[in-house]
Image (spheres, helix red, strand yellow):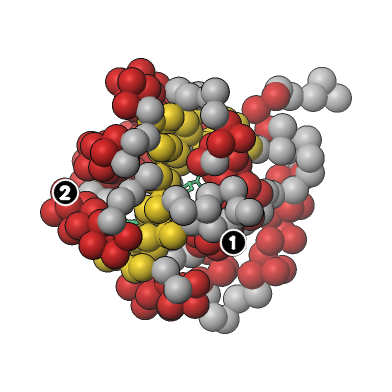
Amino acid sequence: MGKLDGRVVIVTGAARGQGEQETRLFAEEGAKVVVADVLDDQGEALAKELGALYAHLDVSREDDWRAAVAAAKGAYGRIDGLVNNAGILRFNKLVNTPLEEFQQVVQVNQVGVFLGIKTVAPEIAEAGGGTIVNTASYTGVTGMAYVGAYSATKHAIVGLTRVAALELAGKGIRVNAVCPGAIDTAMTNPAQLDPNADPVKAAEGLDAYYRKLVPLGRVGKPEEVARLALFLTCDDSSYITGQPFVIDGGWLAGVSAL
Ligand code: NAD
């Protein structure tokens, strides 16, 4: 028996990183996963490997959401879960951030989550209830200099999560957020995307950097975030809704006096 047997779940930004690991774990647990991303080659390859459905979905485009929902319903007849995982990061001082850059981050991270809830929640309600997991961040519950646009959107996602939980509880839909700290994906470790770099060595460098900041002394693994997303998507979390869950190796717990 899998924890998600018979459930149909859309995962956005599923072609790589945390979304890929969520897709793999959910499929292992019996879910029919809709692999949604803008990285068509990687997404299609993953879907093929898992016998899943791939949908090209730019989360900032309402038409793409409608098409992905239609494809999911065409293939599986229902939708009972959504993981809003897609996101982008840009580094800049607030006063140096071009308006277009700020708006681009809002469009993907914040509008993308809004459109996901708006488009998919009615389908989940029609299926008799289910779950939505939004990917916020450590920077959604505290500040971080030089990622102002990103942090603003991740705070917004925590707010959207709370409001959606309140509005959708009556439809049997639970809505929670994951708030990862530093996780070893291409977003934090761009060496993963550089054919001339050594991503393992780069990850060791990240560990050394985060050892000073993170009590558990290392960056997190995308598989660890996937296990939290699974918990919030399956019945193990049946009485939990409207909450942000920090998964950060203790980073947010505080600072050391020595
Ligand atoms: P990643 O860059 O490997 O994955 C992001 C995925 O989102 C990619 O597959 C990308 O193609 C997809 N994506 C980007 N724009 C999209 C769009 N408009 N429509 C659809 N898909 C799009 O990084 P990741 O770490 O796996 O990121 C997953 C989520 O976790 C993001 O929301 C990110 O902000 C969040 N997060 C990451 C970290 C970290 O340290 N890696 C920490 C906290 C939160």
Mark 2 crowdedness (10 Å alpha carbons): few <14, some 14-19, many ≥20? some
The residue furthest bottom is: 196
Residue 64 on image: x %, y %: 19, 57
Q: Residue 32: horizontal and vertical position, in percent?
A: 44, 60
Amino acid, disc 1: Glu
Q: Position of residue 73 (x, y in %)?
A: 25, 56
The outermost residue toward the left is: 63
Q: For the point 32% across and 26% down, which residue is it?
A: 171
Residue 62's label in the rendered image is 2
Confirm whether residue 189 shows in the render.
Answer: no
Mark earlier in primary sequence (1, 2): 1
Tag nearer the camera, 1 or 2:
1
Q: Nearer the viewer, residue 106 or 129?
A: 129
Give the amino acid type for the residue marked by disc 2 in the picture: Glu
Residue hosting label 1: 28
Residue toward you, 144 or 129: 129
The N terminus appears in which quarter of the rendering?
A: bottom right
